[in-house]
Image (spheres, rainbow, N blue to C red):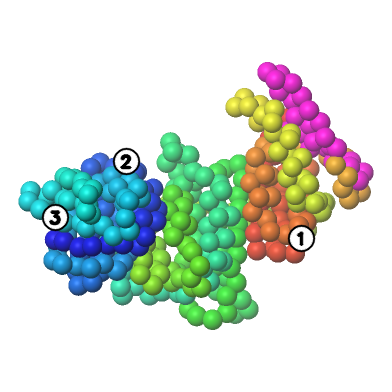
Amino acid sequence: MKFVINKNDIRNILGKVQGITGRRTNLAITETVLIQAKEQTIKIVATDLETGFEGEYPATVESEGTIAINAKKLFEIVRDFPSDSIDINEVENRWIEIGKENIEYHIVGMNPEDFPDIPQVDDAPLFEMDTQSLKRMIEKTIIIGGAPDDKRAHINGIYFENLDDDDSKTLKMVSTDGSRLSTVDYPYENGVCPIEKGVLIPKKGLGEVLKFLGPEKTVAIGLKDSHFVLKKENESFTIRLLEGEYPNYKDIIVRGIGHDVPVDRQLFLMVLKRMSILSSENYRGVIFNFEKNLLTVRATNPEIGESREDMVIKFAGDPIEAAFNPKYFIDSLGVIEDETAVINIVSSDKPCLVEGEKDKSYLSIIMPMKI
């Protein structure tokens, strides 16, 4: 096999798949990328046995073939290569020559026949949606990460469902870590989404997909053989679904009670960032005191000290004192796009709702801490 590639065509791609090839599995070959040269293109394939990626890119192919080469080393070579044009040539015993003129690398490859199969999804029923909307949905849900040692599917996955009734059609993503929950809606009118029931997609897989969502207007999504599928013009992803039931999240979303408190999003965000300076592993919470037209935020850490900041708000109810993890509010406020955020506070022991004043497609529910 021998081909010539422009490094600008594959450098960013090789960088983006490092999150897949760098993930430890029981198979050493998953640290490689599979490169198939055919006609005037190369296909780059990567997998960690859970998330699979395929992409086709232009190349000058002198002889066809397939190689499996260490993804990290190939990326580092391509990234720092002194010329745009790079010759890649497989010689004997799976050794691969990479070079041009006065620079040359000899890298040992692995047997491409040992590379795990990627699910074939050419015939998968797909639904076309706005790329930037999907990107925002993922960004606003993966801020709630999964714990590496937590085996619960609903903690490590994002629940993705299609709500299709006579009046409206909505795609919804839901994410939780047990202490907070976020939901994001994508209303649509045209098309038929093949996702008929809710599925659980691994957060880390969607995190890899996020790297590839660029300026293209639309992407296609769907399901095939227990895999979530995403396709672009020349690239595709498959993510193996998680098995398990998702909790009935709708039970904790209670609207219409409590007090809606509008706040300047950026101002409130900076207050919480300043108050979280004194947070530590043992002392994460801050105290919110809601009084007439005033919010006082206090942080106390016996190991470091204490702090307090007042903020003028519109609040006319009975005083409420509640403790929260400020990081949860910081994460939520960071993805709300409205200038004004609305906090719905009920009592010291009820969840707090956070959303934009105008855009109601995103909702964050934050559980209080014990004082």
Query: Disc 2 designates what residue?
Result: 24
Q: Could you say which disc has been placed on residue 90 in the image?
A: 3
Name which residue type carries label 2: Arg
Question: Is 301 drawn above or below residue 268 in the view shown?
Answer: above
Extreme-left residue of the structure: 92
Q: In the rendered image, is residue 116 in sight?
A: no
Extreme-top residue of the structure: 303
Q: Residue at x 16, y 50 (%)?
A: 96
Closer to us: mark 3 or mark 1? 3
Bounds of the magenta span?
A: 285-310
Q: Secondary structure at mark 2?
A: loop
Q: Residue at x 39, y 62 (%)?
A: 228
Which numbered disc, 3 or 1, marks the residue that appears first in the sequence?
A: 3
Q: Could you say which disc has been placed on residue 357 in the image?
A: 1
Q: CA distance from mark 3 to mark 1?
A: 59 Å
Image location (x, y in percent) of residue 86: 26, 57
Magenta stretch: helix, strand or loop mostly: strand
Q: Residues within 10 Å of mark 3 (few under 14, many from 20)?
A: many
Q: Is residue 296 magenta?
A: yes
Image location (x, y in percent) of residue 90: 14, 55
Q: Secondary structure at mark 3?
A: strand
Which numbered disc, 2 or 1, marks the residue that appears first in the sequence?
A: 2
Image location (x, y in percent) of residue 365: 66, 50
Q: Is residue 189 magenta?
A: no
Image location (x, y in percent) of residue 329: 68, 44
Q: CA distance from mark 2 to mark 3?
A: 26 Å
Extreme-front residue of the structure: 102
Which numbered disc, 2 or 3, marks the residue that appears first in the sequence?
A: 2
Q: With 50 as the anchor, is 187 left or right in this view?
A: right
